[in-house]
Image: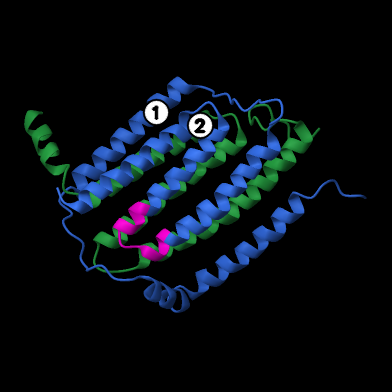
C-alpha cells in the first residue's frame, strides 16, 4: 500500500461518510455542513486524479457558491427562531431497497468491467493551460453557450425571487 | 465465492480506476436516496448536488485513466457551470414557494394554480 492509496482511502472515507450524514441526518443544518465535507472530499479525489484546476474550482464554486446558497435557502425557509429544523422523510424502506440495489449493481458492474484498468496513461501535469486552450478552440461553442446560460440563470433568478409585482 | 473474495481483497489496496468509480457509485446512490426520500426541497437539492458530484468524479476518472486526453475534464467544467446555474434558479423557486405556501415540503405543494 503506497501513500497514494492511503490518501485515496482517507478522501473516499470522508466523502462517503459525510454524504451518509447529508442524506440520513434529521437536522437540516447538520446535512448542510456535512455537505461541506463531501465537497472537500471530492476535491481531494480530483487532486488524486491530477485535475488540479478542477479541484480548486470545486472548492471555489461548490463551497463558496452553491453551499452558501443552500445555507441561505435553509435559513430563509425555516423558522430558525422556533427551532423547527427537523425534517421528515417519506417511503424510506422501498427507497433504501432500491438504492441498495442500484449501488450494488453499479459497483459490481464497475468492478467486473474495469478492475484491470491498470495505470494512468500519462504522467501528472498541470491542467490549467491545456483546459484553457481547449475551451478556446475545440469547445468554444459550448463555452459561449454556457456563458449565455449563466447570464439567463442570473436574470431569471433575480426575476423569480423578486417579491410580488405591483400591477 | 471464496476465490472471488480473495481476489477482491487483493485488488482492494492498490487504487485504480474502478476504486474511483465505486466511490462515485456510492455517492450517486446516496444522492438518489436523498432525492427520493426527503420532503424538504432544499435537502432534495443537496441530493442533486451529490449526484452531480458523482458524475463529475466519473468523468474525471475516465479522463485520467484513458489515453491522455482532457475531454472528460472539460465536460466536468461544464457540469460545474450548470450546477451553479441550477442551484441559483432552484433556490429562487424554493423561496417563492415558501412565500406562497409557507412550507417547502414538496409533498404538500401539489396544486399548480389556486
Principal secondary structure, stretch drawn in magenta: helix
According to the picture, the residue beneath numbered tag 1 turns out to be: A98
Q: Residue B27: where, in percent of width, then height?
A: 39, 41
In-image side of A148 versus B74 (left or right): right
Q: Which residues are magenta?
A: A44-55
Tell me which residue sits at (75%, 49%) in the image: A161
Whether residue A126 is situated above or below residue A99 in the rendered picture:
below
On the image, the x and y values in percent for residue A105 come to: 29, 35
Residue A114 in sight here: yes
Frontmost residue, A36 versus B14: A36
In the rendered image, what is the letter of the chain coloured green?
A: B
Q: Position of residue A7 (x, y in %)?
A: 26, 49
Q: Marks 1 and 2, Cα distance to the nearest angstrom? A: 10 Å
Residues under numbered marks 1 and 2 in contact, where contact means CB atoms less than 8 Å apart: yes
- Chain identifier of the residue bearing label 1 in the image: A
**Chain on which label 2 sits:** B
Q: Say what secondary structure mark 2 lies in.
A: helix
Residue at the disc numbered 2: B36
Mark 2: give few (<14), some (14-19) or many (20+) Cα within 10 Å.
some
Amino acid at each position: 500500500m503506497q501513500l497514494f492509496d492511503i490518501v485515496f482511502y482517507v478522501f473516499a472515507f470522508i466523502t462517503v461518510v459525510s454524504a451518509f450524514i447529508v442524506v440520513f441526518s434529521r437536522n437540516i443544518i447538520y446535512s448542510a455542513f456535512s455537505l461541506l465535507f463531501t465537497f472537500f472530499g471530492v476535491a481531494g479525489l480530483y487532486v488524486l486524479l491530477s485535475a488540479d484546476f478542477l479541484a480548486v474550482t470545486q472548492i471555489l464554486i461548490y463551497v463558496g457558491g452553491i453551499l452558501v446558497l443552500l445555507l441561505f435557502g435553509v435559513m430563509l425557509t425555516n423558522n430558525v427562531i422556533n427551532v423547527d429544523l427537523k425534517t421528515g422523510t417519506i417511503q424510506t424502506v422501498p427507497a433504501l431497497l432500491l438504492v441498495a440495489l442500484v449501488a450494488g449493481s453499479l459497483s459490481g458492474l464497475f468492478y467486473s468491467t474495469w478492475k484491470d484498468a491498470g495505470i494512468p496513461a500519462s504522467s501528472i501535469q498541470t491542467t490549467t493551460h491545456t483546459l484553457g486552450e481547449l475551451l478556446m478552440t475545440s469547445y468554444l461553442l459550448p463555452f459561449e453557450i454556457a456563458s449565455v446560460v449563466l447570464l439567463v440563470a442570473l436574470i431569471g433568478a433575480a426575476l423569480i425571487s423578486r417579491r410580488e409585482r405591483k400591477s | 465465492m471464496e476465490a472471488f473474495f480473495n481476489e477482491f481483497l487483493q485488488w482492494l489496496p492498490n487504487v485504480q480506476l474502478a476504486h474511483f468509480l465505486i466511490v462515485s457509485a456510492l455517492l450517486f446512490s446516496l444522492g438518489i436516496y436523498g432525492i427520493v426520500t426527503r420532503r424538504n426541497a432544499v435537502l432534495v437539492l443537496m441530493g442533486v448536488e451529490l449526484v452531480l458530484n458523482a458524475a463529475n468524479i466519473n468523468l474525471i476518472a475516465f479522463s485520467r485513466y484513458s489515453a491522455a486526453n482532457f475531454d472528460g475534464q472539460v465536460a466536468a467544467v461544464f457540469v460545474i457551470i450548470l450546477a451553479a446555474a441550477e442551484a441559483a434558479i432552484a433556490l429562487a423557486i424554493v423561496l417563492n414557494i415558501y412565500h406562497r405556501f409557507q412550507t417547502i415540503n414538496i409533498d404538500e405543494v401539489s396544486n399548480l394554480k389556486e
